[in-house]
Amino acid sequence: MAVDLESTPKLSAPPGRAGRRRRVPGFVYPVVSVLLGLLIWNLVSMNYTSFFLPSPKLTWDGAVELIKDGTLWQAMTASSGRIFAGWALGVVVGVPVGLLTGRIQWLRLMLDPYIQFFRFVPPIAFVTLAIIWLGPGESSKIALIFYTSVFIVALNTLAGVLAVDELRLRAARSLGAGPVRTLVSVVLPSTVPYAVTGARLAMGNSFLTIVSAEIVAAQTGLGSLIWTARNYAKTEWVFVGIIALGVLGYLFDWVLRALTRATLRRYGVNG
């Protein structure tokens, strides 16, 4: 017997099911994660003294106290300025050094021992020398951040230069491009993703360095705030300083990622 396909009822999903399968907004997951973390923190803090592990409420009260008297804002501003100044100087110096060492072999061979040596010496080892040579002012902290940043940026830029396809370089030379033209039109665009990656890594390391530098020689800054909190047995202030560092780092990296995406699009690279 023939079956009339047109008259056969079609199977369909139960009404309303498609509407219920809505995608959860992306921001919900981080919010839930943070709230869950605060809940766990609060539950754990109930088993310890406030000196050992202050609760979220006590930490919030400490933050409000530091905000009202201007201490927290002053500390965040001081640390942010030092980090940005040292990091920017490291990027400005590191990118050209990476480009030149990548393109000039004899320069790379001469600088390689120094780069390989100093990149393994942590910045905290130079804190005392920085204070002796530059004094306890801003210059010593900025110099330490610069030291932290410059090698990371230079090495990542150097890796980008060495990764440029040799065929592209030959094609540029065959079209009459000189060394400078080849550097600007071929090498630099290919190196941009490596340079911006180095800049992001250097930013993270800058936050690692600033605390050590400010603890040793600074009257203001988040590192100084954390050390002062220790002297006054204010553990909640220590937590406020740590959270402020994390928030600052997140904001700095968010801005840098936005600039990175714009830069990569400018050079036609997906990132």
Image (tube, helix red, strand yellow):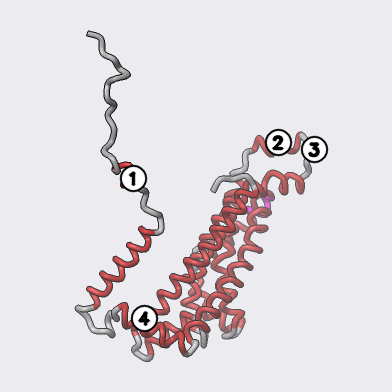
First to last magenta residue range: 104-108
**Cα gap from disc 1 to disc 3, whole angstroms:** 62 Å
> How far apart are the two marked residues, 4 and 2, measured between alpha carbons?
61 Å
Q: Which mark is residue 122?
A: none
Q: Is residue 52 magenta?
A: no
- Please state which amino acid type lies under the numbered disc 4: Trp
Image quarter of the N terminus:
top left
Indicate the secondary structure of the residue bearing disc 4: helix
Task: Decide which of tag 1 and tag 3 comes sooner along the chain.
Answer: 1
Comparing 13 with 99, the one in front is 13
Distance of mark 2 from mark 1, alpha carbons?
A: 58 Å
Q: Residues within 10 Å of mark 4 (few under 14, many from 20)?
A: some
Task: Identify the residue at horizontal 58%, vertical 59% (top origin).
Answer: 153
Closer to the N terminus: mark 2 or mark 1?
A: 1
Q: Which residue is mark 3?
A: 176
* Tag 2 residue: 170
Residue occupying image coordinates x 49% and y 72%: 209
Q: Which residue is mark 4?
A: 60
Q: Could you tell which of marks 4 and 2 lies nearer the N-terminus?
A: 4
Q: Is residue 107 magenta?
A: yes
Please give the name of the residue rendered at 28% of the width and 72% of the height, measured from the top-left corner: 41
- Residue 197, compared with residue 61, is above or below; it is above
Label 1 residue SS: helix
The numbered mark at residue 19 is: 1
Judged from this view, the residue extending furthest toward the front is 7
